[in-house]
Image (spheres, rainbow, N blue to C red):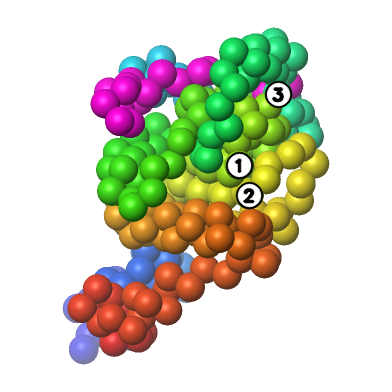
């Protein structure tokens, strides 16, 4: 083949595997460089990841959408709270401030807890984290699925008021769960965006939440989004962890997630090409 007719882009032998993953593999090359189209896609993904970190969560819109959901025919009425990080710049520079509630938010939760003597089983905490787009896009459809599955459980689970936290980190859920006297806290947070997943939602479960716990006391379900772990699978995994945490009276490293073993054993519910 003459140089004039030779393709500009040289294909990579691994390119066929790209249908299985969003990872950047088998991109090919143009000379010794990336093809222009792949370089532009990379730059777009990088811009989306930066936007996910810096764009503020639309709390009013999220609260309105949450009020469309209900538990036992009672609509959710989210409480909007704030961490000790006053703005996004402070939040990114001072992770410690994102782990604690601002004084006014803490006082509001204390008053709410004193007004209700009930001891809820679960407190659902929604935190913007490092990806507001993950929370904006995925929290409501996930909760719609999870609350439906929760109501179908054999035993009733008492819920504390749902809270939405601005400029928050994962550990802030433990303080909120403690203030609401909840036996367990479920925290939904925007995960650190990757170049192929700027909208990844993380779910953390803690049994017996109190301020000052480490990550060793939490269970995590990661990459919850339409292109990652589906809402239905994430909901069933979370319910399994809740049941086991309630049975064992613990969470974290002492609580193993066995749901994947069930999925792998059942090929009709599993489509991973590595295990088929």
Q: Kindly state the secondary structure of the residue where label 2 is placed.
A: strand
Give percent across and percent down for residue 190.
51, 41
Quadrant in which the C terminus appears: bottom left
Q: Which residues are magenta?
A: 66-87
| Mark nearer the N terminus (3 vs 2) | 3
Q: Nearer the viewer, residue 140 or 33?
A: 140
Q: Residues within 10 Å of mark 2 (few under 14, many from 20)?
A: many
Q: Is residue 42 above or below residue 74?
A: below
- State the CA–CA distance, disc 1 to disc 3: 19 Å
Give percent across and percent down for residue 38.
37, 59
Q: Which mark is residue 183?
A: 1
Q: Is residue 107 left or right of residue 47?
A: right
Number of numbered discs overlaid on the protein picture: 3
Q: Which-is-in-front pick, marks 3 and 2? A: 2
Q: Which residue has dot 3 on it?
A: 101
Residue drawn 34% across and 75% down? Answer: 263
CB under 8 Å between discs 1 and 2: yes
Q: Kindly state the secondary structure of the residue where label 1 is placed.
A: loop
| Mark nearer the N terminus (1 vs 2) | 1
Q: Kindly state the secondary structure of the residue where label 3 is placed.
A: loop
Q: Is residue 44 above or below residue 31?
A: above
Give percent across and percent down for residue 64.
34, 18
Q: Which residue has dot 2 on it?
A: 207
Residue drawn 28% across and 48% down? Answer: 152
């Amino acid at each position: 083949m003459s140089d004039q007719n030779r393709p500009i882009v040289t294909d990579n032998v691994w390119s066929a595997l790209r249908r299985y993953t969003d990872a950047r593999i088998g991109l090919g090359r143009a000379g010794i460089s990336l093809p222009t189209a792949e370089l532009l896609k990379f730059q777009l993904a990088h811009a989306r990841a930066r936007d996910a970190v810096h764009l503020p969560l639309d709390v009013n819109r999220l609260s309105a959408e949450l009020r469309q959901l209900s538990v036992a025919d009672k609509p959710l009425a989210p409480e909007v709270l704030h961490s000790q990080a006053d703005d996004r710049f402070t939040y990114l520079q001072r992770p410690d401030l994102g782990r604690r509630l601002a004084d006014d938010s803490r006082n509001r939760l204390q008053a709410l807890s004193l007004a209700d003597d009930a001891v809820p089983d679960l407190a659902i905490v929604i935190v913007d984290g490092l990806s507001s787009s993950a929370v904006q896009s995925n929290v409501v459809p996930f909760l719609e699925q999870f609350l439906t599955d929760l109501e179908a459980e054999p035993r009733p689970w008492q819920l504390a008021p749902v809270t939405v936290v601005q400029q928050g980190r994962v550990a802030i859920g433990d303080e909120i769960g403690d203030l609401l006297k909840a036996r367990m806290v479920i925290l939904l947070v925007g995960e650190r965006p990757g170049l192929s997943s700027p909208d990844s939602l993380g779910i953390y479960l803690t049994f017996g939440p109190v301020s000052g716990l480490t990550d060793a006391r939490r269970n995590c379900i990661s990459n919850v989004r339409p292109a990652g772990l589906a809402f239905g699978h994430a909901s069933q995994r979370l319910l399994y962890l809740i049941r086991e945490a309630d049975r064992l009276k613990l969470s974290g490293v002492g609580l193993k997630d066995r749901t994947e073993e069930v999925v792998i054993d059942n090929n009709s519910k599993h489509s991973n090409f590595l295990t088929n």
